[in-house]
Amino acid sequence: MSDPSLLVLASLAGGDKHGYAMMEDIEQFAGIRLGPGTLYGAITRLEEQKRIKPIASSDRRQPYRITAEGQAHLAQTLQQLSAIVKTGLTRMKHA
């Protein structure tokens, strides 16, 4: 799965992070290195959808937090993906 928005939400589900920390986290758990344009494009879309929000920081880096709406969307999407994976694995056993 390489949907940047989903990867950002999954990263932020583990705690607040700034962009570079998200890139590192995503690479670690998904094996995918998002470029800055892809990452910040996803962050912008997620902010517009109210799924993440910036939080105050004294650092020059801007941290983000997943919102309740973002958590609900992530949970629903992961449930759908889980059903797809389960079906695919079951069908592969019979192939």
Image (cartoon, grey):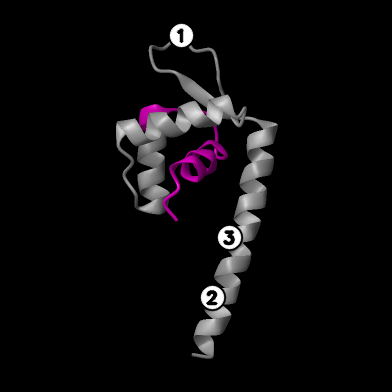
The mark lying in front, picked from 2 and 1, is 2
> Which residue is the site of mark 1?
58
**The residue under label 3 is which amino acid type?**
Leu
Q: Residue furthest bottom?
A: 94
Mark drawn on residue 88: 2
> Which residue is the site of mark 3?
81
**The residue under label 2 is which amino acid type?**
Gly
The answer to whether residue 41 is above or below residue 3 is above
**How many residues crowd around disc 2 within 10 Å: few (fewer than 14), some, or many (20 or more)?**
few
Evaluate whether residue 35 shows in this view.
Answer: yes
**How many residues crowd around disc 1 within 10 Å: few (fewer than 14), some, or many (20 or more)?**
few
If you read the primary sequence from the N terminus, does the residue marked by circle 3 or circle 1 appear first? 1
Callout 2: helix, strand or loop? Answer: helix
**How many residues crowd around disc 3 within 10 Å: few (fewer than 14), some, or many (20 or more)?**
few
**In this rendering, would 30 be left or right of 56?**
left
Evaluate whether residue 17 shows in this view.
Answer: no
Callout 1: helix, strand or loop? Answer: loop
Count of marks, rendered view: 3
**In this rendering, would 36 be left or right of 90?**
left
Callout 3: helix, strand or loop? Answer: helix
Residue 8, horizontal then vertical, whole percent? 48, 39
Q: Is residue 26 magenta?
A: no
If you read the primary sequence from the N terminus, does the residue marked by circle 2 or circle 1 appear first? 1
Start and end of the magenta stretch? 1-21
**The residue under label 1 is which amino acid type?**
Ser
Asked whether 56 or 37 is in front, the reply is 37
Residue drawn at (69%, 33%), measured in percent from left and top? 68
Residue 30, horizontal then vertical, whole percent? 40, 52
**In this rendering, would 81 be left or right of 26?**
right
Residue drawn at (36%, 36%), measured in percent from left and top? 38
